[in-house]
Image (cartoon, grey):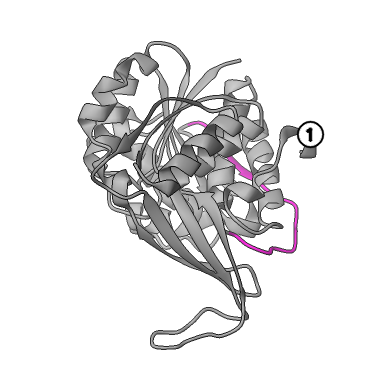
Amino acid sequence: MTKITIIGSSNTDMVIKSAHLPAPGETVLGGDFFMNPGGKGANQAVAAARLGGEVHFVCKVGKDVFGETAMQQFKNEGIHTRFVTQDPLAPSGIALINVDAKGENCITVASGANNSLLPSDIDAASEIFEAGDFVLIQLETPLETVVHASALASKKRLKVVLNPAPAAELPTELFPHLYAITPNETEAEILTGVAVTDLLTAEKAANILLNKGVQHVIITLGAEGALYKTAYETQHIPVAKVVAQDTTAAGDCFNGALVVGLSEGMSWPDAIAFACKAASISVTRLGAQASMPRLNEL
């Protein structure tokens, strides 16, 4: 089993499901409330662990009830937590999520301890890069930490996969360290200036990312699957049609599954198809980590 290192965020999601998403100034009544463990890093770690990956997680939580619960949740999922630390000065991250009847969502995050995951924490955990193959990172921790971790992992000849979410502009020095990047349509537009509306525009955006120094580009296209592109190959990988209940963490599920597939030696198209299938299952369920499928379900 290949070791997968995931560096990122951990949040507690507070979710309200209602008929429609509130407009500015609007109060929407009626709807179920529940709490779930979340955060892009933690979601991806749980997705990868449930699909058979040996996952080592690097993150920071608060020294509070949410942090204690998260630590226990990681252990229950079989995730290695040696480099999950608790910050005594910052609260654990919290996400407030509204989900409508069609499964669409809007999310507000109070990052808390996630913002105190610094380059020095990556240096303190640097031995985690001495073995293994893949490193998966997102953008819910400080950008300087993302750049530092990517450079360090790349120097150790690990394959760095960046899920550039939440959407943000990235420094040019980051891209050459990336083995792969996995934006959705919105993120691809922010990174390239190309509005991704179909396969042709997705390919155009992918070419720009390749020219920045990334080796492999996967643009996720929701119900249309994903576009995979390198300097030598272009493929569209479709996904099965499902009735979505909640799209929260579908991208996280995709990324966690992708690195598991690649670490198991799958080809890129097969690993992407594996990830699309996992994500299509996750959107039929409510919640973030709660929606992540297990290997036998695929």
Q: What's the residue at 59%, 38% (across, down)?
A: 47
Percent from the top left, x then y, of residue 157? 37, 15
Q: What's the residue at 26%, 47% (across, down)?
A: 90
Camera sees residue 233 = no
Q: What's the residue at 62%, 38% (across, down)?
A: 272
Percent from the top left, x then y, of residue 86? 33, 36
Where the C terminus falls, by quadrant? top right
Toward the front, the furthest residue is 65
**Res. 265 image quadrant:** top right
Q: Secondary structure at mark 1?
A: helix
Range shown magenta? 232-247
In the rendered image of this protein, does residue 40 appear above or below residue 121?
below
Percent from the top left, x then y, of residue 255? 54, 40
Toward the bottom, the furthest residue is 26
**Res. 231 image quadrant:** top left
Q: In terms of depth relative to the viewer, which is nearer, 71 or 132? A: 71
In this figure, what is the number of numbered marks?
Answer: 1
In the rendered image of this protein, does residue 33 appear above or below residue 265?
below
**Res. 277 image quadrant:** top right
Q: Is residue 133 magenta?
A: no
Q: What's the residue at 63%, 21% (across, down)?
A: 264
Is 90 positioned to the left or the right of 221 in the image? left
In the rendered image of this protein, does residue 1 appear above or below residue 245?
above
Camera sees residue 243 = yes
Where the N terminus falls, by quadrant? top right
Q: Does the magenta stretch mainly form a helix, a strand or a loop?
A: loop
Is 259 positioned to the left or the right of 58 in the image? right
- Amino acid carrying label 1: it is Asn
Q: Is residue 244 magenta?
A: yes
The residue to which callout 1 is attached is 296
Q: In terms of depth relative to the viewer, which is nearer, 275 or 188? A: 275
Percent from the top left, x then y, of residue 275? 63, 40
